[in-house]
Image (tube, coloured by chain):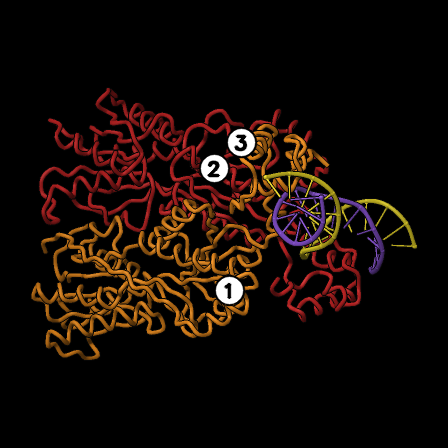
Chain colours: A orange, B red, C purple, D yellow
Amino acid sequence: MGERSVTIRDVAAAAGVSTATVSRTLDPDGSGGVSEKTRLRVFAAAAGIGYRTNLAARSLKTRSTRTVGIVAPELANNFFMDLAEGIEKELSAKGYTLLVASSDNSVEGEKKRVAMLADRMVDGIVVIPAGSRGEHLSSLHTGGIPVVLVDRLVEGTRIDAILSDNEAGARSLTAKLLEDGFRRIVFVGGDKAVSTARERMAGFKAAMKAAGIRLNRDSFRLGGMEVEDGFAHMDVILKSGRPPEALVAVNLLVHLGMERRLLARFPGRRTEGYMPVIAAFDESDYTPFLPACRYTVAQDTASMGKEAVRRILERIARRKKGGNGFQEEQFQTGNTEPQIIRLPVTILKHFQDR
Amino acid sequence: MGERSVTIRDVAAAAGVSTATVSRTLDPDGSGGVSEKTRLRVFAAAAGIGYRTNLAARSLKTRSTRTVGIVAPELANNFFMDLAEGIEKELSAKGYTLLVASSDNSVEGEKKRVAMLADRMVDGIVVIPAGSRGEHLSSLHTGGIPVVLVDRLVEGTRIDAILSDNEAGARSLTAKLLEDGFRRIVFVGGDKAVSTARERMAGFKAAMKAAGIRLNRDSFRLGGMEVEDGFAHMDVILKSGRPPEALVAVNLLVHLGMERRLLARFPGRRTEGYMPVIAAFDESDYTPFLPACRYTVAQDTASMGKEAVRRILERIARRKKGGNGFQEEQFQTGNTEPQIIRLPVTILKHFQDR
DNA sequence: CTGTTAGCGCCTTCAA
DNA sequence: TTGAAGGCGCTAACAG
C-alpha cells in the first residue's frame, strides 16, 4: 500500500553488489572489509536513489538502537534540562541520539518511563532519580541494559553515579555566611530520603561545628524540596519571634519558594523590614534578581553530562564486545563497587546591599 | 547469543493458541475479534512468562511507532519545555509517547533532528520552528508524515499551526502601558523574519496608533530575540539622551537581557536613577522578581499543547484510515488551507513601585 | 473467532 | 573482499 520504500536491495542493485556488501558499507560501527572502490560505489548509489536505513529493521536484528534515554523528574526544570542538553550534545557527537522522558516526579512514573525506554531497546539509560528507591533500576542494570544515575543517589542499588560534591558545596556555602559574620543560620528544606539533601545538610552541620556554633532543633527547617515547601518554611520563619540572620536553601525550588514568600509581604517591591540573607544551592539565570540571595552553589552540569555520557558509553561498549557478555556482566556488577564520581562545585557571590 | 527473548510464539504456546491470536489480543488498536475467554488466557500467559512486545519488530511490520516527536529550539528553555511537558501528558493519555529533540536554535539542526525522527518512524512531528523557513518540513508533511507547528509560523509552508494571538496580546500589553499614562514607549527586540516578532510588533503599532501617538524610528529597537540582544538594546537606551518611559520586550529572553543590563548598573541592588517600566511577552516563575517588569503576557501553553496533540493525532488517524491514503493526503494538502489556531493570552500585572 | 503463512528490511554466519 | 541465504519478532491476509 502506498509507496514502497527504498531498501538495501535497491541500493545493491543500483551499485551492482550484494545486499551484504551494502550492509557492511553502511555499518555504523565501520566493520570494514569493504574495498574503497565498492564503498564509494555503494555510497553513490545510496545517495542517488535516496536510501534511508530502516532503523526498526536494523534494531530487530541487532537488538540495539544507538540511542540512550534519559528520564528526568520533570522537563520544565532548568537544572535537569541543562543536563539533558549537555548530554545530548556529547551523545550526538558520538553518533548516538537521546530520548528524553519525564518521570513526572514519581517513582511510579519513573518505572513506566524506564520500561518504555527498555521496550524501545535504548542501549543505555541515564536516570535523574525521582525518588529514593530504585529496585526497578537495579534489575534493568543487572538484567543487561546499562544505567547511570545523575545528580542523586538511590537506595538499594549498585549503579554508577555522577554527583556534585554536595557536602563540600554546602560546607563552603555555609562558611561564606560565617565569614560574613552571620551566626544564627538556619538550613531550610530537604527530605532525609534524598541523598542530595542529606549530603548538603551534613556539609552545613560540619561548617557550623567547625565554627564552634551549637546546633539545635531550630537550626533546621527540614522537609520538602519543592517551591511550596520553601514558601511554607519561610512563612513560619517570618512569624517566629527571633528570625535567623541567614538561611541556607537546599535547592533552587525551595529557594524560589522562600523568595516568593518574602516578596508576598509587599504590595509593591519595597523591601523594608526583616530581610534575611539567603545562600542557596543551584544557580540559574534568575538568581541574580532574587532579592535575598547572596550566595549560590553552581553545579557543573556540563561536566556532569559529559561524565555521564562517558560512563554509559563505556558500559555499552563493554557489553557489546563481551560477546556473550551476560555472565560476565553479572560478575562485574556483582563484584565491582559502583563508581561514584563527585564533581566540584563553585560558590557564586551575588551582590546585594541590604 | 545470550538469553533468548520471550516472543509471541512463547505466549502462543503457553496459552495454547496461535501467534495470530496473541497478536490480535495484544493489538494496541484493539482490533477485536478475540473471544473474552482467550483474551484472558493470552494475557495470563503473557504476564506469566514475562512477555514484552518487541517494538522494533512491530514497527518494521506496521511502519508506525505510536510515537510523536517534538523538536524544540532548545531544551533549557522554560517556555518550550512547558509546552513539551503538556504535550507529553496529553500524548501518553492516548497511548502515545513523546520523543524530545533539540534543534539547537538552527534550521540546520532542525533539519537533522526532523530527519532523525522520521528515520525512527515517528507517526507525527510537532515542531517549534527554529527559523523562518521550512521547506524541509513541507516535504515531510506532504511526503506522508504529519507535522504541526507550534508557537511560530514559517515561510513557504502550508502546515497547521497552533499559535498565541500575538497581535492582540501586544495590543493589550501596550494599552495597559498607555492607560498608566506612559507615552514614550519603545518596542525592543524581534527579528522581522520571525512571525511572532512581526505580529507582536504589529500589535504594538496598532495600540499606539489607536492612542493617537506618532511612531517614528526611535519607537523601535529591533533585532534579535536572545538575551544578549536585550542587553545590547538596553545598553543603547541607557546611553541615549532622552530614554523612554516604558519598554515593550518582544519575548522572555530579550526581557531578561534588558533587566540584566539594568541590574549591571549597580554594584548592589540599589535601583536609584533611571528605571523604565517594562511590559514583556512571556511569564515565568521569575518575572515577579524582575525589577522593571510591570506587565507580562502569559501564553496558554497547556492549551497549545492540547491543541497540538489533537491536531497531530487527527492527522495520524486520517492517514491510517485512508488505506492508500497517499493521493488523498496529497489532494488534501494541496487544496486545504492550513488550519491556524490562535489561542488567547492573558495580561498579568506585576506589582512594583518605582 | 482462530490458525497458517508470508514477508517487513536488515544483518551475519558461512562459503567462495 | 564479496555473495547467498536464513532468520530477528511481529502482523495481516487468507482460509477455515
Q: CA distance from mark 3 to mark 2?
A: 19 Å
Indicate the quadrant containing the N terminus of chain A: top left, top right, bottom left or bottom right.
top right
Q: Are marks 1 and 3 in contact (CB under 8 Å)?
A: no
**Mark 2 surroundings: few (<14), some (14-19) or many (≥20) residues within 10 A:** some
Residue at 66% across / 40% down in the picture?
A19
Mark 3 — residue? B159
Give residue B7's mark: none
Residue wearing tag 2: B112
Q: Quadrant of the C terminus of chain A?
A: bottom left
SS type, badge 1: helix
On the image, the x and y values in percent for residue A7 come to 65, 37
Q: Is residue B29 left or right of residue B296?
A: right
SS of the residue under disc 3: loop
Dot 3 crowding, Cα within 10 Å, few <14, some 14–19, many 20+: many
Q: Nearer the viewer, residue A154 or B2?
A: B2
Say which of marks 3 and 2 sits in front: 2
The residue labelled by disc 1 is: A111
Respond whether the residues carrying marks 2 and 1 are from the same subunit: no
Residue A233 vs B236, above or below: the answer is below
Task: Give percent across and percent down for residue A80.
Answer: 36, 55
Give me the residue at 16% from left, 57% from top: A294
Task: Give the SS element for disc 2.
Answer: helix
Q: How far across and how far down the image is residue B31, in percent?
A: 73, 52
Q: CA distance from mark 2 to mark 1?
A: 30 Å
Respond whether the residues carrying marks 3 and 2 are from the same subunit.
yes
Question: Label 2 amino acid?
Answer: Lys
Looking at the rendered structure, the kind of residue marked 1 is Lys
The chain that hosts pointer 1 is: A
Q: Quadrant of residue B178?
A: top left
B165 horizontally vs C11: left or right: left
